[in-house]
Image (cartoon, rainbow, N blue to C red):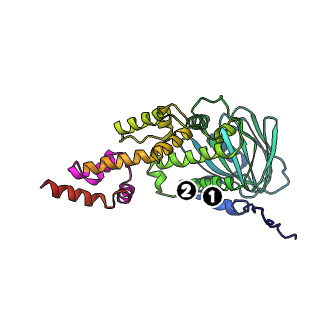
Amino acid sequence: MAEPRTASHGERALPAAPTWAASGWRDVLVHREICRSTPLEVITENLSALYYPARVQRLSRDTEVETSILNAVRLDNVTVGLLRFGTEVVVDPGALGSYHVNVPLAGWVVSECGPRSAVATTERAAVFTPREHTVLPRWSSDAAQICIKISKSAMEDSLEALLGHPVASDIRFDLALDLTTPAAASWLGVLRLLLEEVDRPDGLLSRSVTHREHLEKMLVDGLLHLQAHDYLEELLEPQPPARPRTVKRVVELIEAHPEANYTLADLARTAGVGARRLQSAFQETLHTTPSGYLRKVKLERARQDLLTGEGTVIEIAYRWGFNHPGRFSSLYRRTFGESPSVTARRGQGSAR
């Protein structure tokens, strides 16, 4: 066997493909099992209910069917699952109506979207657009894929928020996504984190809508910055500086209603610019981010209430939009050098 080629002087060695081991699919979403080792008709029925109505047909009846499995969970804007048929099949869902990514953990899958074709492997994912006909004419018997369905509105709203202007009805992605790049490794890290969190019994995702929304947004925004599409060049180009009044509008909103948990997209809409341009303007003007400024104002208002005895620590935390008292205490201590309870006691002492 030939030894792997190493980078010569002056070259940067590419990282190994950031993929799961071939058997790693067995550990994915084990607490989200939909069906296992069932007839093809059963797994097809569940697949159609969770993702898209699809025609699934075995290509060879001479081979023994190995373990088939569908583990999946539907979130707000993303459906994520592990799919393995255990036999060679063709899958034809037609036009999907959503954006979709298949990330193979084992085997290979011939993937077609409109006139384009690619073979998805552990080093190459496939990205599909909503209105073009999608078909997987050969899904190898050993193939197991992470299947990610992203709602059309979530993808396009995210891109519009980043750019600061409307986009066309469909974002046309390149089909083949190289998984061996450092940027892809970062995105796969987000995907792995999402898979682990949705599969963790009684984890934060079951308690916090904000945590769930944050992970979904990281996955969607990451894909928009990673994979080639109609707007990628515009998305990555340097942003011109925003005018001071852009920052002023957002500061006025935050100062007036800091109790709200604004997203970056909310603040960008208020400013009338894209999210990246707003972030750049805040860094240049206030040397912080919009979310950092919002957090600072929330903490200052909470401190005022603690000093004047306007409720318990937990009541004050919730009043100013901190939904996790433990995280509030940690942020507060880091900002003011003391815990909220110490501030509250000091306020009570000065009131006597």
Q: Residue at x 69, y 59 (%)?
A: 18
Q: Residue at x 54, y 49 (%)?
A: 215
Which segment did they paint magenta? Answer: 306-334
**Number of marks in the image?**
2
Left or right side of 284 for 20? right
Q: Tell whether label 2 touches label 1 (CB within 8 Å).
A: yes
Q: Is residue 269 magenta?
A: no
What's the residue at 67%, 59% (across, down)? 25
Tell me the number on the disc at residue 46: none
Residue lying furthest right: 1
The residue pinned by badge 1 equals 28
Residue 74 visible in the picture = no
* Relative horizontal placement of residue 197, taking residue 252 as reference (left or right): right
Q: Amino acid at mark 1?
A: Val
Q: Label 2, on which residue?
A: 199
> Residue 57 in the image: x percent, y percent?
78, 44
Q: Quadrant of the C terminus?
A: bottom left
Residue at x 68%, y 53% (from the top left corner): 184
Magenta span main SS: helix
